[in-house]
Image (cartoon, rainbow, N blue to C red):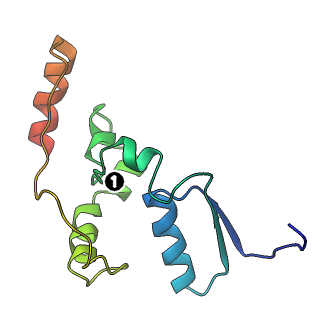
Amino acid sequence: MSHPLSTDVLIVGGGVAGLWLNARLRREGFSTLLIECDTLGGGQSVKSQGIIHGGAKYALHGALTGASEAIADMPRRWREALDGQGELDLAGVRLLSEAHYLWSPGTLAGNLTSFFASKAV
């Protein structure tokens, strides 16, 4: 770079969380700079097969933490965004499935976790 950059917030990573944060901060009037070493939406976003969950997996260890409670409202927020009525307008996004499925590795611990997760979901 031949000249310095100035920004309010530097976001490292252009996955779904980084892109959402970038859009939200810009809407609030912040100057943002998002850096990504590969493709936007790549990395972890692609490794999770494009699945964006509502946070239930964070409650599967039996303890409701501040993080799991804070994201309990995510399914509603995603539905609103996909309808074009949320924080972000994702109405043009192609939705591949309205449902998700749980499976376990076949171990006793995995089967118990899947059982309780299915009840939580």
> Residue tagged by mark 1?
69
Q: What is the tally of numbered marks visible in this picture?
A: 1
Question: In the figure, is residue 5 to the left or right of 112?
Answer: right
Residue at 19%, 19% in the rendered image: 105
Q: Residue 68 at what x, y percent from top left?
A: 35, 49
Q: Residues within 10 Å of mark 1 (few under 14, many from 20)?
A: few
Q: Residue 119 at what x, y percent from top left?
A: 9, 39
Q: Is residue 80 above or below residue 57?
A: below
Residue at 16%, 36% in the rendered image: 117
Question: In the figure, is residue 40 to the left or right of 81?
Answer: right
Q: Residue 5 at what x, y percent from top left?
A: 82, 74
Where, by quadrant of the figure, is residue 85 drawn?
bottom left
Q: Secondary structure at mark 1?
A: helix
Q: Is residue 43 above or below residue 35?
A: above
Q: Is residue 42 above or below residue 74?
A: above
Q: Amino acid at mark 1?
A: Glu
Residue at 32%, 36% in the rendered image: 63
Q: Nearer the viewer, residue 95 or 118?
A: 95
Residue at 14%, 36% in the rendered image: 102
Q: Quadrant of the N terminus?
A: bottom right
Question: In the figure, is residue 37 to the left or right of 79?
Answer: right
Q: Nearer the viewer, residue 24 or 35?
A: 35
Q: Residue 110 at what x, y percent from top left?
A: 20, 20
Q: Nearer the viewer, residue 98 or 61?
A: 98
